[in-house]
Image (cartoon, grey):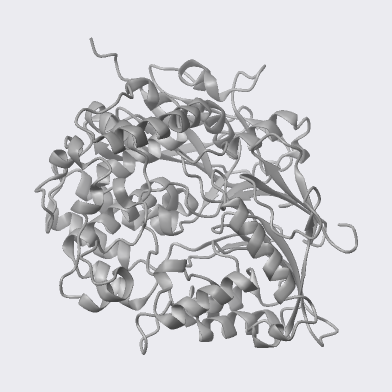
Amino acid sequence: MTSPLPCILAGPVLRRLEPRRLAIWLVATRALAPVVHLPGHPCETTCTLVPIGQHAFVHLLEVAFDTPLPVDTLLAYDVQVPGLGGVRDWAAHLLYPGQSMPNLVLRGRFDQLLHGSCRKPHHPANDGLLCADDLLQACTEPQQRPAALLMTGDQVYVDDVAGPMLQAVHQLIERLGLFNEVLEGARIEHSQALHGDVSSYYRRAELLPSNPGNEGLKRRFFGGKRKPIFSSSNADNHLVSFAEVMAMYVLVWSPVPWSLIELRMPAGLSEEHQQRYSDELPHVHAFSRGLDRVARVMAHLSCLMIFDDHDITDDWNLSALWEQTAYGHPFSRRIIGNALLGYLLCQGWGNDPQRCGPLVEGANELLHSGSTLDAARQDALIERLLHFQGWHYQIASDPPLLVLDTRTRRWRNEDHPHKPSGLLDWEGLCELQQALLDHPSAVIVSPAPIFGVKLIETVQRVFSWLGYPLLVDAENWMAHREGAQTILNIFRHSRTPGHYVILSGDVHYSFVYEVLIRDRQRSPHLWQVTSSGIKNQFPKRLLDVLDRLNRWLYAPHSPLNGFTKRRKMQVEPRTPSNCQAGERLWNSAGLGQVLFDENGRPARVYQLNADGTAKTEFVGKSGV
């Protein structure tokens, strides 16, 4: 007998929180009319919902207050569902001991932030989001709470999926009746056939599209062999359909849907794939066991997000040639569009409900078109998503928070389309400069570090020059000459004398650089703070070698520094407190923690290590 479906599948997740307005996200198995209640603070709840299946509805609750909420105060809140009661009745796992309701704190200043990226469910490392749960339990005063949890990219891996996770995705699609879609340009006609095809496990690369008209791309990157457009080396289980993407989001943020599935070895796998499934299964089980604590964190901290490539696909928009190839094929365009639609409903909408509202209206029109989505409407919506220029956003906090979209507003190399694009185009960089001018301090989120490891950037530049940027993931701010010069000139501008902290992820290791402009008395002071990954790590031996070589080749007085684009800047690395002598790069899954002083400078920078060891502090020459 099939167990009944729970009413609430995921959430509540706290998204953008401001004194007069809160945004709260959840997914339910039926259309609801929830009401948010904050004792002592009258408010009005507006609920917008989007169906994604017969038994699945995404809800965004926008809560408005006539009187601003107090800051630095513990505020209990509840989400009342007619016929179900409050959170303690339908999601008791979200409550800390002694609580009857979850709570939130609106910080008057962003004096503490958590940040991280790259959370791959089947990676052997522990889940860094559990560090946030430990931290919240240790907070005894509201002022000790972080102002927000910044997820700076790769919140989901749609292009690198374990076999057991793909099986969980397909079982959840069936239980919830997630919508079917027509697949143009594919070997299969509709997504329902794909979801039921066990033979495609670990063989998705054979189904993904290739472009026979672009022989130059194939010869350059794949040795002349017929290969898929998608360049990930781990695309064996690449998600394809909108239903798969939405099921993935629910499964990585909530323990509830895991009660609806049963992981077991699929029939028909080859011996090699059976072994791979068996190897991945313990990691997926361990990941799912921690999700009650992950969901608890997301119900108590403002979660602000921005995409990077794995949220959509590896090397997303790396070059103009990549874009021409991927968007020129109807099937690859649909795959990318489905992932972007999932991002809209699960991430972008909660970041900026007003700006994303028109796109959500378009999604609602599509998703009310029937159990099989109308293909023409779906393609039209994807066209709007691909040309949307509003994924970036700002928070009017103290210091202000500026979150950059470094994926869809790229500075394309029109003369050499196979070379990497700049991470932000001229217009986007001008907007960034205007946002920064005359601010005494600011926090900038750039998914990829603006100031990265020189040796690694040099290797990427050499491979790009040879015509192989995909082989080394050649996506960094310095890879595009005009873009690099412009971003560095912004920081050297005479009206940017403040303190700027750049929070980044992407690279699967962590480091902190202090940056000053040479020969400037009234110089802006910058800090590049990188924390990656939440559940991912760089190969240890390789990182040790790269770290050592970087210190040798780019020591402070090395003549090689004269060839870098940052030669007019003085870059001083901070040292991880519990590292071996001389190390600058810290290789541990976890979360970054930054504590700011009253001037917006990072007084303390830590990496909270997911393996349970003591947190690592990045220490500068002055001792902090």
Say above or below: 111 vs 268.
Answer: below
Percent across and percent down for residue 3 are 29, 13
Total numbered circles: 0
Outermost residue on the bottom side: it is: 415
Left or right: 563 as drawn, with respect to 292: right
Outermost residue on the top side: it is: 1
Left or right: 534 as drawn, with respect to 9: right
Outermost residue on the front side: it is: 271
Q: Is residue 107 visible?
A: no
Say above or below: 238 vs 193.
Answer: below
Percent across and percent down for residue 567 are 70, 84
Q: Between residue 13 and residue 243, name the one nearer to us.
A: 243
Q: Between residue 202 and residue 422, name the one nearer to us.
A: 202
Q: Between residue 129 and residue 273, name the one nearer to us.
A: 273
Picture residue at 42% right of the left edge, 59% below the top: 309
Percent across and percent down for residue 398 are 71, 58
Picture residue at 31% right of the left edge, 23% below the top: 264
Say above or below: 308 vs 119.
Answer: below
Say above or below: 298 vs 205.
Answer: above
Q: Quadrant of residue 22?
A: top right
Q: Is residue 247 visible?
A: yes
Q: Quadrant of the N terminus?
A: top left
Percent across and percent down for residue 24 are 48, 39
Picture residue at 65% right of the left edge, 41% below the top: 69
Picture residue at 44% right of the left edge, 32% below the top: 284
Q: Quadrant of residue 144?
A: top right
Q: Quadrant of the C terminus?
A: bottom right
Q: Between residue 432 and residue 219, name the one nearer to us.
A: 219
